[in-house]
Amino acid sequence: MVLPLSSVRDVDYYMNLPYPIQLVYDSEEGDWVARLPDLPGCVSDGADPNEAVRNVADAQRLWIETCIEDGQEVPLPTNTGFMCVP
């Protein structure tokens, strides 16, 4: 039997990978939105870019924990760095 990588690697392993962050200013809400495109639905916001990035790290941890608990494969990063969208 071959175990999925998610069952062998722990949350901290995935948290230390360089997932790209998409950072967008939402002028309607007046806050910043941080999204991890490689982890569908992993989104958070904040009053400034730094807060949004800190908050999305919490969302990322919960996203990965849930994925592992459900026996799903955690996607690996497709590229690295920040992506600012006008």
Image: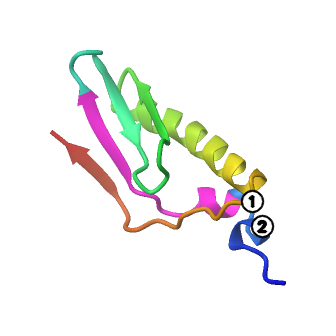
**2 and 1 marks in contact (CB < 8 Å):** yes
| Residue 71 marker | 1
- What type is the residue that disc 1 sits on? Gly
| Residue 30 marker | none
Can residue 83 be found in the magenta stretch?
no
- Which image quarter holds the C terminus? top left
From the viewer's perspective, tell me whether residue 58 is left or right of residue 19: right
Give the farthest residue toward the front.
1
Q: Residue at x 31, y 40 (%)?
A: 23
Quick one: label 1, few (<14), some, or many (20+) residues within 10 Å? some
Q: To which quarter of the image does residue 28 belong? A: top left
Give percent across and percent down for residue 1.
84, 84
Span highlighted in magenta in the image: 12-25
Callout 2 secondary element: helix
In front: 78, or 53? 78
Give percent across and percent down for residue 64.
64, 51
Q: Is residue 82 above or below residue 2?
A: above
Q: Is residue 81 above or below residue 41?
A: below
Q: Is residue 66 above or below residue 75?
A: above
From the viewer's perspective, tell me whether residue 5 is left or right of residue 22: right
Q: Which residue in the structure is indicated by mark 2?
A: 7
Which color scheme is applied? Answer: rainbow
Q: Residue at x 27, y 36 (%)?
A: 24
Give percent across and percent down for residue 17.
54, 64
- What type is the residue that disc 2 sits on? Ser
- Answer with mark 2 or mark 1, whichever residue precedes in sequence: 2
From the viewer's perspective, tell me whether residue 20 is left or right of residue 64: left
Q: Residue at x 78, y 71 (%)?
A: 8
Callout 1 secondary element: loop
Q: To which quarter of the image does residue 73 belong? A: bottom right
